[in-house]
Amino acid sequence: MLFPEIDVRLERVDFTAETLVVVAVACGPAPGCPSCRARTRRVHSSHERGLAERPLTGKKLQVRLRVRRFFCNRSSCRRKTFVEQVGGLSECYRRSSLGLKQWLHAVAVELGGRPGDRLCRKMSLTAGRSRLLELLQSPPVPERSPRVLGVDEFAFRKGRTYGTLLVDVEAGQVVDVP
């Protein structure tokens, strides 16, 4: 099964020597408005989105997903229409699937920009170094910063690998370093 536990109906699969194109239709329940959360059933129109997906059998996988645009029923809501998002597959304003986004995030965490870009090209993934770097997020800021900070530097092997240890002296615990 290509999309397990995702509300899509597979229409057809087209393939060439280097690309696999999957045409699917969103068939889940009517979503709520993203602004006011009101449920609706009034369909405005539908259109096709192109989503890059993780490669399959060494070929690029492109998903052509037909999604519906709905009217918002509340007159007080500023949003008059909205497009449904398929949970587990699509995300607003993204041209890649959530699965591909997770893969690219893992590559960005391990390799960063340029090396990650080179690996993505080898794996037939569409991502540049700036796309990889924008997937990285800064670590959360602690609620309270230490007032007294102890710094201890050490070497694993003399002249080889050095490390730094930060200690919150008042709390008596090691401070996480990103």
Image (cartoon, grey):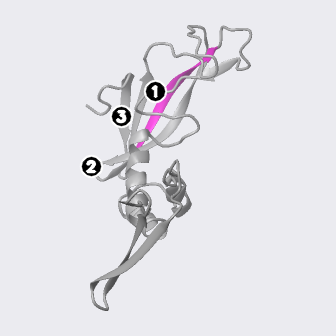
| Pointer 1 residue | 86
Closest to the camera, between mark 1 and mark 3, is: 1
Q: What separation in Å lies between label 2 and label 3 (alpha carbons)? A: 14 Å
Residue type of the residue flagged with mark 2? Thr
Mark 2 or mark 3: which comes first in sequence? 3
Secondary element at image label 3: strand
Q: Earlier in the sequence, mark 1 or mark 3?
A: 3
Q: In this view, which residue lies farthest toward the bottom?
A: 159
What's the mark number on residue 57?
A: 2
Residue under label 3, please give it: 13
| Residue at image location 55% in from the left, 16% down from the top | 32
Q: Amino acid at mark 3?
A: Val
Is residue 117 or residue 135 the one in the foreground?
135
**Cα distance in 3D space between marks 1 and 3:** 19 Å
Q: Is residue 1 left or right of residue 46?
A: left
| Residue neighbourhood size for the residue with mark 3, other residues' Cα within 10 Å, grouped as few (<14), some (14–19), many (≥20) | few
Q: Which residues are magenta?
A: 61-71
Secondary structure type for disc 1: loop
